[in-house]
Amino acid sequence: LASALRGPRVPPFAVARRCLHASGRSAAKSESNENPPRAFDLALLEFLVCLLSKKPLRYEASTNELINEELGIAYPIIDGIPNMIPQAARMTHQNKKQEEMEQ
């Protein structure tokens, strides 16, 4: 990942795609049904940025995710805690459409 980020010719969405495919996992869901999930504190958006692009994130309440519009990835929020690990993120539909246009 570090070598991919240093390369000047690698587009950021390609790095995100590599990170997601390398893990072979999708976003994890909370398995605890005992307590209701905690709400995400919107004040955190002032401090949180995407680890891959260093850009601000947008909170999407309907999916309970932090969205990076530029890279087309979504980080899950589990029990009020954002999972900012790139391997835990999922590709959004917007990025899938961009990939289809490139082919």
Image (tube, rainbow, N blue to C red):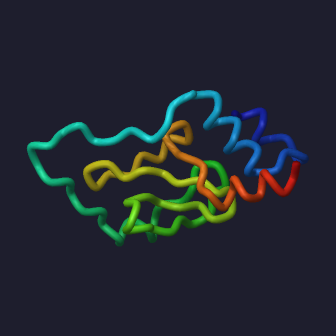
Name which quarter of the figure residue 7 lies in: top right
Name which quarter of the figure residue 21 lies in: top right
79 lies left or right of 99: left
Q: How many labels does the image show?
A: 0
93 lies left or right of 88: right
Name which quarter of the figure residue 63 lies in: bottom left
Q: What residue is at 82 percent from the left and 50 percent from the top?
A: 11
Q: The N terminus lies in which quarter of the figure? A: top right
**Nearer to me, 51 or 71:** 71
Q: What residue is at 63 percent from the left and 65 percent from the top?
A: 69
Q: Is residue 26 above or below residue 46?
A: above
- In the rendered image, residue 15, in percent from the top left (x then y), is placed at 73, 42
- In the rendered image, residue 83, in percent from the top left (x then y), is placed at 42, 46
Q: In this view, does 10 lie above or below 98?
A: above
- In the rendered image, residue 43, in percent from the top left (x then y), is placed at 35, 71
9 lies left or right of 1: right
